Amino acid sequence: MTALRLVQRMKRDWMHTGRRPSGLCGAALLVAARLHDFCRTIKEIVNVVKVCETTLRKRLTEFEDTPTSQLTIEEFMKVDLDQECDPPCFTSKTNNQRWVGYPRNCT
């Protein structure tokens, strides 16, 4: 149930756009397993969902940047956040150093 709720939250935070579902499911399985004290390694999850280890780590990093990752287990189960995050591709572009000095209003 926790993994399903994580995937729903990832969809709400636009993490599913342009991504294969297996990467999101792998990240949700790993987080849910660790939340419930099941010792699963990244390699075990990779063997189940058939994605690359770097893909799984990337999805975990993207999830880490969302407000949901800051909640405790109890808060995550009870609270449904109303706010949505920007897509990961948008936030990575705004955090990129080459865009810092670039003027935003080009006409």
Image (tube, rainbow, N blue to C red):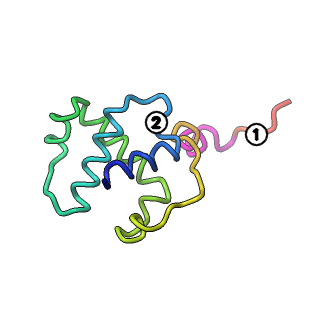
The percent position of residue 51, horizontal first and vertical second, equals 25, 30
Q: Residues within 10 Å of mark 1 (few under 14, many from 20)?
A: few
Identity of the residue drawn at 13% across and 41% down: 44
Q: Badge 1 is on which residue? A: 104
Q: Quadrant of the C terminus?
A: top right
Asked where in the image residue 83 lies, by quadrant, the reply is: bottom right
Let me know if residue 74 is in the magenta part. Answer: no
Classify 31 as above or below 44. below
Give the residues drawn in magenta, as a range. 91-101
Q: Secondary structure at mark 1?
A: loop
The percent position of residue 48, horizontal first and vertical second, equals 17, 35
Tags 2 and 1 in contact by the CB under 8 Å rule? no
- Left or right relative to 41: residue 98: right
Sequence-wise, the earlier of marks 2 and 1 is 2
Camera-nearest residue between 35 and 54: 35
| Residue type highlighted by circle 1 | Arg
